[in-house]
Amino acid sequence: MKVKTYLLNAIAQFGYKSAMKAGGTASQYGTYQAKEPKAVSEIRNKKNA
């Protein structure tokens, strides 16, 4: 059981790290990223306040 748990944790950590690295790559390669609408920004700011 310990080997299975260790292996699953290692895979999860690898997936998390690769997702974090991939999160910022979209703008580096010049792909389109839509601008956030003002209404969505206002709603988010109200929830965080």
Image (spheres, helix red, strand yellow):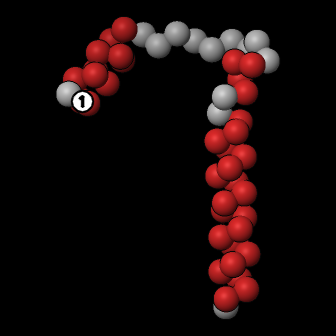
Residue at 28%, 22% in the rendered image: 45
Depth check: give the residue in front, 34 or 30.
30
- What kind of element bears circle 1? helix
Q: Quadrant of the C terminus?
A: top left
Where is residue 40 shown, x and y percent of the image?
36, 17
Residue that sits furthest to the right in the current view: 29
Q: Quadrant of residue 28?
A: top right
Residue that sits furthest to the bottom in the current view: 1
Q: Measured along the vertical axis of the image, is residue 32 above or below residue 18?
A: above
Crowding at dot 1, Cα within 10 Å, few <14 / some 14-19 / many 20+, comes out as few
How many numbered marks does the figure carry? 1
Residue at 33%, 12% in the rendered image: 39
Q: Is residue 29 left or right of residue 21?
A: right
Q: Quadrant of residue 42?
A: top left
Residue at 26%, 30% in the rendered image: 48
Q: Is residue 1 left or right of residue 49?
A: right
Q: Is residue 36 left or right of residue 15?
A: left
Where is residue 15 shown, x and y percent of the image?
70, 54
Where is residue 10 shown, x and y percent of the image?
71, 68
Q: Is residue 42 left or right of residue 14?
A: left
Q: Measured along the vertical axis of the image, is residue 26 above or below residue 20?
A: above
Residue at 65%, 70% in the rendered image: 9
Q: Quadrant of residue 2?
A: bottom right
Residue identifier under label 1: 47
The amino acid pointed to by label 1 is Lys
Q: Measured along the vertical axis of the image, is residue 36 above or below residue 49?
A: above
Q: Quadrant of the N terminus?
A: bottom right
Where is residue 12 shown, x and y percent of the image?
66, 62
